[in-house]
Image: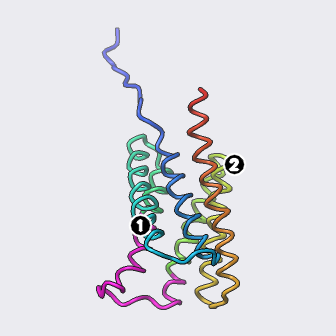
Amino acid sequence: MSDITTIKDTTANPAPLGLLAFGMTTVLLNIANAGLIPLTSMILAMGIFYGGLAQVIAGIMEWKKGNTFGCVAFLSYGMFWLAFVGLLVLPKMGLAAGPDAATVGYFLLLWGIFSLVMFIGTFKINLHLQIVFGTLTVLFFLLTAHEFTGVAAIGTIAGWEGIICGATAIYAGFSQVLGELNK
């Protein structure tokens, strides 16, 4: 007779929350990057509360489930959104000088490199995440090129590519939610 007790994990899958938070926030920001709407407090609020905080919560939940990839991805991109909003808001509040285009370019370049490494990690997961991280990597490098060159067309192309990236994350998130309902 064994005295070992097995505890079954009955907590919800946090990945759909993180994917939807990332995807919807990415689509909204990139609608502005594509020049279709202005960058307003609506997008900044989405960046703080859904893109930022919801992904941080999803990342902590992934940690609890023992999913290192999900934990690192959601916590990192959640913090990306909070940092991005901070870059825009802190100067307006008089709390820090605003970054110049080259500085923002380096910020985005680092996120592009991070995304590229995470993209490589998706080869062991699934096609949906490969597409999300692949398009995200392209997005960050396009945004980086836009900041370094100042070429408006690159920014517009990045906006449209970002809409595609966000839409793939929304699809991946909803496919997990709806897939789990059909089990």
Residue sitting nearer the eye, 41 or 61: 41
Q: Position of residue 30 (x, y in %)?
A: 60, 70
Residue sitting nearer the eye, 119 or 157: 157
Residue sitting nearer the eye, 121 or 78: 78
Residue furthest to the top: 1
Q: Amino acid at mark 2?
A: Leu
Question: Looking at the image, which residue is at 49% across and 55% down?
Answer: 21
Name the front one of labels 2 and 1: 1
Q: CA distance from mark 2 to mark 1?
A: 31 Å
Tell me the number on the disc at residue 134. none
Where residue 50 sits, quadrant-wise, is bottom left
Residue 117, placed above or below residue 20: below
Magenta residues? Answer: 79-106
Give the mark, 2 or 1, whose residue is nearer the N terminus. 1
Question: Looking at the image, which residue is at 68% across and 69% down?
Answer: 161
Q: Position of residue 163 (x, y in %)?
A: 64, 65
| Residue 6 located within the stretch drawn in magenta | no
Structural crowding at the residue carrying mark 1, measured as other residues with C-alpha within 10 Å and reported as few (<14), some (14–19) or many (≥20)? some
Q: Are marks 2 and 1 in contact (CB under 8 Å)?
A: no
| Residue 82 located within the stretch drawn in magenta | yes
Query: Where is mark 1, residue-wise?
Result: 45
Element carrying mark 2: helix
Question: Looking at the image, which residue is at 62% across and 42% down?
Answer: 175
Tell me the number on the disc at residue 127. 2
Residue sitting nearer the eye, 3 or 167: 167
Q: Position of residue 89 (x, y in %)?
A: 38, 79
Q: Amino acid at mark 1?
A: Ala
